[in-house]
Structures are given as structure tokens and as C-alpha cells.
Image: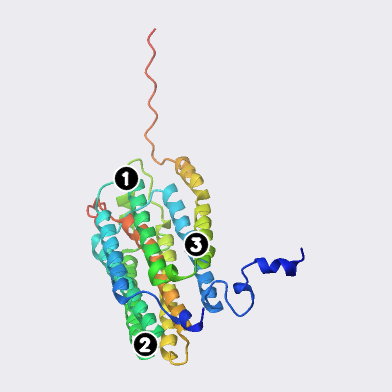
Amino acid sequence: MNAHAEEHFAGSNKLFISIWVWLVVLTLIEIFLAYKTMSTGIMLTILLGLSIIKAALIMAYFMHLKFERLSLILTLVPMLVVCICLLMVFFPDSMRSAGLRYQFKQPPPVAPAPVEE
Amino acid sequence: MSTEARADFFPSADWEGGTLPYRVGHRKLGMWLFIVSDSLTFSALLMGYSYLRASNVWPTPFPFYPSIVFASVMTFCLLSSSLTMVFGVSASSKGDKAKARKWILATIFFGTAFIVLHLIEWSHLIEQGMRPFYLPEHWVTAFTTTNGVPPSPLFGATFFTITGLHMFHVATGVIYLLVVTARIKKLKHEDVEISGLYWHFVDLVWMFVFPLIYIMSVDMHGHLAGVAH
């Protein structure tokens, strides 16, 4: 390894333009999806999936991580992914508190039908 | 076996001093570590937003115009600014500082355009009466559920906090890049590359903010259309 090799910036302009085109296309797909009727869960899954792909493209090519040493990638990425996943520990509580909400102007309970003997 | 004797078995190249285990300089490693910690800041904010959203009645008030059109053009600005930044770093790696400066100035242009568009978009919402802790009254009317549960006023708090912090990052990035262009002759290539890392990170964060805040809050059933402003 020498100083010259370190200075070299891998990847051609053509490659970067094609990555940019991909990013724009994925964004257009997201905007298109915004006006499709589907359940929130499916919509969220697709949008986050697309976002993760876009983030990976930016990190790999624009931020040059693909051309760095594997040790750097293994130091930065798995730790970040684990920490972000650990933040999801709060979601069960979020779902629970949605059910605990006070129901304003709730329709009055209906009396059960008399049981005929 | 003594430690000195065992040392022969280890690949020594990285540990002799003078070489770098990650093959990046300490400044670049420092920027990467900053980026990781800052990603966690944004992750925590987006998780907080998702928490509130899942546990409350949440308004979905963004119309196609101006909100979605503005946000889409802003996304395009940021993506293009990332591309020009890559070209700048690429020119800098070939030692062409003048060309690098031009590309970075283009990046600054797109970054500034993003901030201006975002402030216009904010002013649309503020004019309608959206505040960090209040919703405009016609939004409350439109998004109250059939059994009378009103939408959460924290919509504004999460919106202004997350997009505001992101806008602050873009503004910081613009200032950072201005300093880099001013001093580009004195800077090493690695310093230019580090400023690029920061800029791409700002772009990367928007790739999550845009779908989660904007796309997920589109008023696709026309709730607001039926309510007088």
C-alpha cells in the first residue's frame, strides 16, 4: 500500500450517473405509491424497503463505502443496524396505548337482548 | 510462549505503526463515527414520530400541491447535489482543484435551493395555522374520527423537529462546503472527500424523512377538500 493508492477515488462518472438515475427512479416510485390505496402496513414496508435500498446505494457508491476496506464496513454498519433495531423495543407500548385511548362521545352501550326461557 | 514470540504468528502489517487498520485517515474515520452517531439521532427522532403516530389518531393533511410537489423537487435537488459532490470529489482525487471547486459550488447551489424550497413549504403550513403544538382548526374538523377522537396536535411538533433538524444539517453542510471551496487549494484530497461524506449523509437522511413524513401523510382521500379553510 502506498500514498498514491490511497488517493485514488474509484468509480467512473458514468457509474455515478447511473446510481443517480436509480435513486431518482426509486423516488418516483415512492411518489407514485403515495396515491395507491393499500394498507398502512404494506405501504410502510414497501416505502422503508425502497428507502433502505436508496440508503445502501448512497453509502456504497456516493460515500464510497464499497471501495473501502471490509474492516471499516464491518465496524460501522452492523452496529448501526443493531442499535436502530433495538429502538423498536418501544413499539409494543405504542400499540398498547392506542387501545387505551379514551373514547370520546362513544355511542352508548346497547342493552343485551332479553334471554327467552 | 512469550508474547514477543507469539507476535510472529500475527499478520503484522497493520500493527507496526505508520499504517492504518482501516486504510483511512483519522479525520475520515472521525467523520464516519460522527455520521453513525448522527444517524442514531435521526433514527431516535423518526422512531419517536412513529411511536406517536401509531398510538394516536394522526392527520394526513398533505395535498399534492404544494406539499408533495415541493418535497419531490427538494428530493431531486438533494439527489442532484450528491451527484455534483461526487463529481467534485472525483475531480479533487485527480488533482484538478479548479474543477472540484466548480462542482462543489454546484452542490452548494442545490443545497441552498433545498433550504429555500423547504422554507417556502414551511410557510405554506404555518399560514394554514399549523404550529408545533396546534393543528389548524379545519384539519381538526376533517380528521376527527367518526366516534369523535380528534387528531393528535403533536403532528406539528414531530414535523417541525425532524424537518427542522434536517434543514439545520443542510445549512451547516452549505457553510462547511463554502469553507471547503474557499480553502480548496490548501486542503488535501481527503479533506474534500470528508466534506463529501457529510453531504451524502444529509442526502441519506432525507431518503428516510421524505417517505415517512411526506409520503405517509398524503391527503389521498381528500379529507381537507370537503372542509372550508
Pointer 3: what residue?
A: A77
> Pointers 2 and 1 in contact (CB under 8 A)?
no
Query: In the image, what residue type sits under mark 3?
Result: Val
- Tell which tag, 2 or 3, sits nearer the viewer: 3
Above or below — where is B84 with respect to B204? Answer: below
Residue B224: x percent and y percent?
A: 26, 54
- Tell which tag, 3 or 1, sits nearer the viewer: 3
Residue lying farthest bottom? B185
- Label 1 SS: loop
Mark 3 or 1, nearer chain start: 1
In terms of image quadrants, where is residue B127? bottom left
Pointer 2: what residue?
A: B101
Query: In the image, what residue type sits under mark 2?
Result: Arg
Callout 2 and callout 1 share a chain: no
Q: How many marks?
A: 3
Above or below — where is B119 with respect to A2? Answer: above
The chain under label 2 reads B
- Rendering colour mode: rainbow
- Label 3 SS: helix
Residue A86: x percent and y percent?
A: 53, 53
In terms of image quadrants, where is residue A50? bottom left
Alpha-carbon span between mark 3 and mark 1: 31 Å
Pointer 1: what residue?
A: A39
Alpha-carbon span between mark 2 and mark 1: 47 Å
Callout 3 and callout 1 share a chain: yes
The chain under label 3 reads A
